[in-house]
Structure formats: structure tokens, C-alpha cells
């Protein structure tokens, strides 16, 4: 402002000075001319007087003009300052202090908020308002900042005269004099007490909401057992009812009950899974698995839903050879199950196909993209924006056609994100939908080496006939990988032409793979036409069907087919059938079908079911008896141990985890303990639990159980457990009184080496068996040495871990005695019995020596048979 005044005043003063100088220059010479020297001498006083008066007049004029200008400029400058002061007084608390912090000025707002009057504040130090909310170091830092001439800003809690506290947003700036010397400080504050209180209330409300949310999620997550137990009874008993003789009306009603119960269970599972995610109780496993096998199993499971709607499910729709990865297969399967289920739900005709592509790969990991593509109704862009929001559906109207909780996709999104992946959708209305997600998974070494394909199959020539493009492409890719000469056609008519032309050119097809359902001419009729042609009679035919029904196997066999498969195609099954029909593998007397409604796989064995719930007892007992098994029941762990002690030779135990008197965990520990005195402490134990919480499976395994079955029990999963854990022959007694004697027992007690078991696992390939045996023996030498080292270091946990590995590896190569000894060491380690472990090391080495010798002899002997 000062700089604006100076130029104006300087200009006016210059003008006045010039006027005065001009006046003097003009007046003095003329005065000298008019007067003689003598007269000038006489008039000297008059001249001086005139000059003095002229300068006085000039001075008065200058002062007048200067004052007038100053007043005008001051009025101009002060007016906005007054307005600013009014505004600041209304909003801010302003104070000024000297260098010691003593108050020299306060505005009205400061007085009003603090409660002190001006007289009580002036001359007092600012610590008069100290609330003791801030530490001494806080004020020291503030003083250090402003004393160095810097501006300080923060939020401060002060104490008013009446004792209440108030918060101010404070800025302190230094004041300087005309010599640029620091003379004090000005503080400008804004009262933020209301905002602070709002934040406190908001934080409190947020905390209460989070506590309520966690409590809700904990409640729902922990309700798993209570909810699933009655559902197990409903679904299980209904399955038994469906397996009985029912008339048409009863069958219809029973199927309705099953459909409703399964739908209800799906909703319950969605809610429980969502709650587990929200409660942070969902943990991911990290285990190696074959992604291709997992997808094929999933396709077989989900195909029933697709068949019910007349759809084709192709899962996977592209070959996945040797795709071993390390991840959580259960959660990946859950994501795919949800996406495939949605695709089937919203598709009225056509197909659902699942593709998996490797989009990036390094030596240690690979990035996979999963696509679930359907030919359904499609989803608009506006609906897509809300799909992954919890409790949201594409159609949320009360008249919507498709039901559901609206949680499925939200759970998928959370699971994918939990695995550090991405999920999305590509869709157009009426043009189908593709749900996709990407995951970065670690590479894993194959647990079981993939079988070496018989290259003799490459001497065959195969024609593939299928009207579905996705199926044709999958078949083509598989045969290309196997290096089998082949061609593909889209219908029966072109197939007949292709077969005839090949025969005429002396390059006939030897095998034809025919789709059952094709337009104009189906697979059965095409088979008949081929058989009716003399030049085509030698062709062996395989039927594949996407809508398999009970009795199809007999029908296609009568029609002249040599093999039969139901879709979705599993590559291992397809290859086996190709080997069988080409004569490269022993044929099965019956065609294999996977769709029979009542032709269950039959088992032989004596099982013990330990379950306290009477309904659940009936369910599992009925299911197992229907599979040809003898079943004993026990209501708790004590009864189970008593039953095992009575001398009944049981082959396997299904063990509930939560029971009165003695739970499943305690019972398992006692069964495994040699001091309990059971004849077979190594009997396979399968956990049955309605708990679905993170860590439940591991808890069962840690307790000594062999596997885990979640309730409600699924008949397919029960059969899978039986196939894995039930002995193929009559149960073999295990002698545990002397570990040294165990390894020398014959097959009447326990086998040192089960050649048939190893051969079955490794596709009866002697070269592969020999290679695996060599690798196993190399590893065992190192592992036994590691056990010895850890025993000397008293590292019992590491001993347990190594023994666990030896147990599994030995079982995989048919080393039953060595596996049993490793289990003994594992259990002793778990119990902290380091002396017992130390005493058994020699037995372990002896067992390994026997196994190594017998394994080498039998593999070599069988290779030359």
C-alpha cells in the first residue's frame, strides 16, 4: 500500500517545485532590469521578503496537497481492513503476544470462546489456556518453530475459564518491526470443537458397527455345525428314500424335497462362506494339485445340472496336460462351481464351456486365466456394474425368474482377491456371457508322475463326428497332443462320405468317435449305416453322449459300439478307451457308464461309524449298506474304542468330531496310541464334521485322522473316500507289539512291498516304476539321515514332519511296512516321546532295507515277464 502512495506524492511535489523555480527565474531578472543598482540595494529587503513568501506559499501548498492525498488513500486502505477485521472477529480467535508469550491483544471472538474478559487476558501468558492434553515436548516443538521465524500450524485443545475444553485449529506467525527484528507473534485460531465431537461420535459409531458386524459374522460362521447337522439328515434320508421303490407320484415328491433341500443348503453355504470372509476366518490352503484333473472332476459333478436343462457342459474345453500348481484347489473349485452354476441357470439352450489358458509363465509361477462362457441371455452394462456387490442380482425385481441370495458372485470376488487375482465379466444382452478371473499360481512338482502314453496308438486313424464346435475343438486338440492321426466332421452325412473316401484311397479309419445327439442322423443310426457298409465294417466305434441316461450302456453295446463315454469328456478316460478298443489294453467285459442311477460301485468291508446324532447314523448307515458294506455304529468315542477292542475286524472308521462323553479328536488320539492296545491302531479314520470353518480340516489331520468329509455327506464323496482308503482285499492285521518283527511279516500280516498297488498307481509301466523307486530310495536315505540329526538336536517337531513325509511317500510306492513304522515315529514325535523315536530308528532303517531289496527284485522280475 505504501508503494502506491509514494509515486503520486512525488509527481505533485515535482510539479510544484518546477512552478516555484519558473517563478523565480522569471521574476528576478525583470526586477534587476527595472531597478538601478542603487535602487536594487534599497529594495533588497523587499526581494527577500517576496522570495520567502513564495517559498512559504509553496510549502503550504505542498503540505495541503500531501495531507489531502494521504487521507484519501488511508480511507481507501482502511475500509477493506475494517471489513476483514469484522469477518475475522466473526470467525477466528485472534491474539498477539510478545516474545515471551504474554498476551498483548485479543479480539472479541477470543474473549467470547475463552470465557475470560480482556483485562483478565492482557499481560497473561498463553499457558493460562493450557488443557494438559498435549505433552511438554509438543509446546517445545511449537516454540522452536516460531522462534526460528517459521509458521506453525496444528490442532490444539484449550481449557476455557469455566473448565470446559474446546479445540482450535491454530496458525501462529512471527511479527517483525521496521528493522526486521522479531518482536512477537500473532495467533489465528478457528473453533473446531463441533467437528471434533462429530469425529469422536463417528469413530464410536463405526467401532460399534464393526463390533456388531464381527459379532454377526462370528455368530453365523460358528453356526455352521448347528445348521448343517439337520440338513445332513434331511438330504441324507431323502437320498435313501429316492433309492427305494417309489411310485411315480412319490418319486416326484421326493425329487422336489431333494431339489428344495439342495437349494436351501446352497443358500446356507453362501451365507456361511460370506460370513467367514467378513469375519476373517477364511484361510487358504497351499497344496500341489493337478488343475486338469480338478476341472475334469468338477465337470463330471456339474454335468448333472447341465443335463437337467438339456445343455452341454464342456469342462475343460481345452486340454490341460501336466498343469500341476500349488494353491487352494477347494476355493478355486468353489469359484468355478458358482460361475458354472450361474451359467447353467441363465442358459436355456446351447452350452457352457470352461477354458483355462496360461497367459504368462516363469520358472516358478504361471498366470492363468479362467473363462466360463455360456450361450445364455446375456447381461446389460447397467446390470454388470452391480453384479459383484453383495446381495445384488442382475434382476432384483419381485417378478424375477431366477432366484438366489445375491452372494455367490460377491464371494467369488472376495475369494479371487484373497488369492491376489482379478475377476470380471464380458457380456451382451442375448449374446451370452463370459465370466473370467485370473490367478497367479506357483508351479508344483507332480505328486504322481503322469503316465507315459502308449505310442502304438499313433498307428490308429480316428474320425471324430460331433455337431458341437467346442467339443470338436477339444477332441481335435487332445488327439493332436497325443499325435494320433485324425479328422473331424460336423454331422453324420459328411462322416459317411469321409469314411468311404478314406477306404477307397486305402487309408481307412480304424476308429470312429460318434456323438449321440446330432441333427438329421444321430449316433445310433450312423453306427448302423457304417455297419451296413461292407467296406466300413472293420471300424471300431465309440459313443459319446452329453445326455446320458440309465440303460444307455446296454443300448449302445447292442448297437455295436465298442466303447461308451458320457460328456464332459475326461482325457484319461478317453485315452483308456482308445487303448482298449485298439487292443493295446485289456478290455473290460462291460461298457463303463458314469450315469447309472442305481448301479452304485460295490465295496466289500466292515466299517465302524461313530456318530451321536441318530438321524445322521441312519443316513450314513443306509448309504454304506447300499454300497455293500457291513456297518457297526457307536455313539461316542468311548463306544468306538470299545468296539475296536472287541475283536471285530474293522477296515475303516467314519468319525464324527463333536460328540458327548468323548469327542472324535480324543478318540482318534487314543486309537493311534499303542498303549490303548488296539489290534490295528493304524486303521484309516475319516473325519465327519458339520464344521466348515477355516482350519477344521487341518485340525482333524493333526489329531491323527486320515481324511476329512464335510456334512451333509455327499454319496459321491463317500464313494471317493472308500476308493481311496478302503483296502481292495480283506483287511490285513497289523502287529504293533514289536516294531522289529513287523518288517519281517509276510502278506498275512503286513506287506513289505505291495507291487500291485504301486503298479496300479503308475499305469503298470516298469520303466516308470523303476524311475520312481530310484528317486524314492535316494530321498529316503537323506530323510532318515535328517531324522537322526534332528534327534540329536532334540528338534522333535522336525522329526514329526520328516516322518510324516516318509509315511506318505512309502505308501505311494507300496511300502506298507515302512509307512506303518513312519506313522509310529510320527505319532511318538507328536506325543513328545523322543526316546521312543530314537529306539525306532534302527527299525526304520531295517524296514527301508527290506523294502529297497524287495522293490528292486519284483520290479525287475515283472519287467521280464
Image: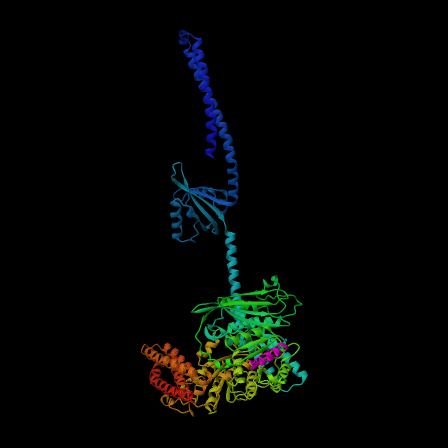
Give 362 or 733, whichever is nearer the viewer. 362
Can residue 91 be found in the magenta stretch?
Answer: no
Q: Quadrant of residue 787?
A: bottom left
In this view, which residue lies farthest toward the right? Answer: 249
Picture layout, residue 426 above or below residue 698: above
Locate residue 793, reporting x and y percent: 32, 76
**Residue at horizontal 52 percent and vertical 55 percent from the top:** 198
Picture layout, residue 432 above or below residue 787: above
Picture layout, residue 276 above or below residue 588: above
Left or right of 677? Residue 429 is: right
Q: Quadrant of residue 745?
A: bottom left
Locate residue 319, reporting x and y percent: 52, 74
Q: What stretch is highlighted in magenta?
A: 493-512
Left or right of 222? Residue 48 is: left
Can residue 502 be found in the magenta stretch?
Answer: yes
In this view, which residue lies farthest toward the left? Answer: 792
Amino acid at each position: 500500500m505504501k508503494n502506491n502512495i509514494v509515486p503520486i506524492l512525488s509527481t505533485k511535489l515535482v510539479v510544484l517545485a518546477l512552478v516555484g523555480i519558473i517563478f523565480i527565474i522569471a521574476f528576478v531578472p525583470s526586477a534587476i532590469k527595472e531597478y538601478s543598482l542603487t535602487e536594487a540595494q534599497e529594495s533588497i529587503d523587499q526581494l527577500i521578503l517576496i522570495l520567502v513568501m513564495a517559498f512559504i506559499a509553496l510549502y503550504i501548498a505542498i503540505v495541503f496537497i500531501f495531507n489531502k492525498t494521504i487521507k484519501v488513500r488511508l480511507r481507501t486502505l482502511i475500509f477493506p481492513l475494517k471489513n476483514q477485521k469484522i469477518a475475522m472477529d466473526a470467525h477466528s480467535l485472534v491474539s498477539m503476544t510478545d516474545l515471551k508469550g504474554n498476551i498483548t491483544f485479543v479480539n472479541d471472538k477470543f474473549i467470547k470462546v475463552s470465557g475470560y474478559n480482556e483485562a483478565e487476558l492482557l499481560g497473561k501468558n498463553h499457558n493460562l489456556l493450557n488443557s494438559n492434553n498435549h505433552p511438554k515436548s509438543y509446546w517445545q516443538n511449537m516454540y522452536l518453530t516460531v522462534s526460528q521465524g517459521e509458521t506453525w500450524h496444528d490442532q490444539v485443545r484449550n481449557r476455557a475459564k469455566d473448565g470446559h475444553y474446546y479445540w482450535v485449529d491454530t496458525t501462529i506467525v512471527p511479527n517483525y518491526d521496521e528493522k526486521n527484528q522479531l518482536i512477537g507473534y500473532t495467533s489465528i485460531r478457528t473453533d473446531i470443537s463441533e467437528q471434533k465431537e462429530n469425529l469422536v461420535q463417528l469413530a464410536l459409531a463405526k467401532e460399534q458397527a464393526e463390533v456388531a458386524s464381527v459379532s454377526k459374522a462370528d455368530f453365523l460362521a460358528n453356526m455352521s455345525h448347528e445348521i448343517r447337522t439337520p440338513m445332513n439328515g434331511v438330504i441324507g434320508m431323502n437320498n435313501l428314500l429316492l433309492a427305494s421303490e417309489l411310485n411315480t407320484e412319490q418319486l416326484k415328491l421326493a425329487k422336489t424335497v431333494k431339489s428344495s433341500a439342495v437349494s436351501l443348503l446352497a443358500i446356507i453355504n453362501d451365507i456361511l462362506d460370506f460370513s467367514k470372509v467378513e469375519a476373517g476366518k477364511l484361510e487358504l490352503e497351499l497344496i500341489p494339485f493337478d488343475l486338469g484333473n480338478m476341472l475334469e472332476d468338477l465337470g463330471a459333478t456339474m454335468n448333472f445340472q447341465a443335463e437337467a436343462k438339456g445343455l452341454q457342459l464342456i469342462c475343460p474345453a481345452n486340454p490341460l496336460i501336466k498343469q500341476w500348481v500349488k494353491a487352494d484347489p477347494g476355493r478355486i473349485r468353489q469359484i468355478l462351481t458358482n460361475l458354472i452354476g450361474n451359467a447353467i441357470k441363465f442358459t436355456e439352450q446351447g452350452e457352457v464351456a470352461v477354458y483355462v489358458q496360461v497367459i504368462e509363465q516363469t520358472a516358478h509361477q504361471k498366470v492363468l486365466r479362467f473363462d466360463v462362457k455360456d450361450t445364455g441371455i446375456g447381461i446389460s452394462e447397467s446390470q454388470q456394474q452391480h453384479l459383484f456387490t453383495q446381495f445384488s442380482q442382475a434382476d432384483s425385481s419381485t417378478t424375477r425368474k431366477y432366484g438366489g441370495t445375491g452372494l455367490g458372485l460377491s464371494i467369488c470376488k472376495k475369494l479371487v482377491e484373497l488369492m491376489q487375482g482379478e475377476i470380471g465379466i464380458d457380456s451382451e444382452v442375448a449374446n451370452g456371457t463370459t465370466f473370467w478371473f485370473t490367478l497367479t499360481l506357483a508351479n508344483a512338482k507332480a505328486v504322481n508322475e503322469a503316465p507315459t502314453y502308449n505310442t502304438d496308438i499313433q498307428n490308429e486313424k480316428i474320425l471324430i463326428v460331433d455337431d458341437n464346435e467346442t467339443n470338436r475343438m477339444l477332441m481335435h486338440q487332445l488327439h493332436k497332443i497325443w499325435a494320433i492321426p485324425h479328422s473331424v466332421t460336423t454331422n453324420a452325412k459328411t462322416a459317411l462320405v469321409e469314411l468311404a473316401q478314406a477306404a477307397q484311397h486305402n487309408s481307412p479309419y480304424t476308429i470312429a468317435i460318434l456323438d449321440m445327439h446330432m441333427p438329421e442322423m444321430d449316433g445310433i443310426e450312423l453306427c448302423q449305416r457304417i455297419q451296413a457298409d461292407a467296406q466300413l465294417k472293420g471300424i471300431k466305434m465309440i459313443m459319446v453322449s452329453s445326455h446320458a441316461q440309465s440303460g444307455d450302456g446296454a443300448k449302445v453295446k447292442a448297437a455295436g459300439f465298442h466303447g461308451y463315454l458320457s460328456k464332459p469328456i475326461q482325457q484319461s478316460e478317453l485315452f483308456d478307451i482308445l487303448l482298449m478298443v485298439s487292443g493295446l489294453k485289456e478290455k473290460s467285459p462291460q461298457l463303463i457308464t458314469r450315469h447309472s442311477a442305481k448301479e452304485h460301485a460295490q465295496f466289500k468291508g466292515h466299517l465302524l461309524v461313530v456318530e451321536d446324532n441318530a438321524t445322521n447314523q441312519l443316513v450314513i448307515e443306509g448309504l454304506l449298506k447300499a454300497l455293500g458294506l457291513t456297518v457297526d455304529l457307536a455313539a461316542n468315542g468311548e463306544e468306538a474304542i470299545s468296539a475296536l477292542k472287541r475283536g471285530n475286524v474293522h477296515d475303516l472308521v467314519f468319525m464324527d468330531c463333536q460328540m458327548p462323553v468323548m469327542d472324535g479328536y480324543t478318540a482318534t488320539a487314543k486309537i493311534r496310541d499303542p498303549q490303548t492296545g488296539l489290534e490295528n491302531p493304524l486303521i484309516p479314520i475319516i473325519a465327519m464334521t458339520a464344521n466348515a470353518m477355516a482350519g477344521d480340516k487341518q485340525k482333524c489331520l493333526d489329531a491323527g485322522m486320515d481324511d476329512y468329509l464335510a456334512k451333509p455327506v455327499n454319496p459321491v464323496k463317500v464313494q471317493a473316500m472308500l476308493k481311496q482308503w478302503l483296502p481292495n482285499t480283506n483287511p490285513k492285521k497289523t502287529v504293533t507289539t514289536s516294531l522289529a518283527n513287523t518288517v519281517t511279516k509276510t502278506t498275512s500280516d503286513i506287506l513289505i512291498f505291495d507291487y500291485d498297488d504301486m503298479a496300479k498307481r503308475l499305469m503298470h509301466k516298469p520303466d516308470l516304476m523303476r524311475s520312481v523307486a530310484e528317486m524314492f530310495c535316494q530321498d529316503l536315505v537323506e530323510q532318515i539321515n535328517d531324522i537322526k540329526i534332528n534327534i540329536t538336536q532334540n528338534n522333535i517337531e522336525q522329526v514329526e514332519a520328516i516322518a510324516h513325509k516318509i509315511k506318505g511317500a512309502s505308501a505311494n510306492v507300496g511300502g506298507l511296512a515302512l509307512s506303518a513304522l513312519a506313522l509310529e515315529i510320527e505319532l511318538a514325535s507328536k506325543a513328545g516321546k523322543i526316546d521312543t523315536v530314537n529306539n525306532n530308528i534302527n527299525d526304520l532303517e531295517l524296514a527301508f532295507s527290506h523294502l529297497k531289496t524287495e522293490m528292486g527284485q519284483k520290479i525287475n522280475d515283472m519287467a521280464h515277464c
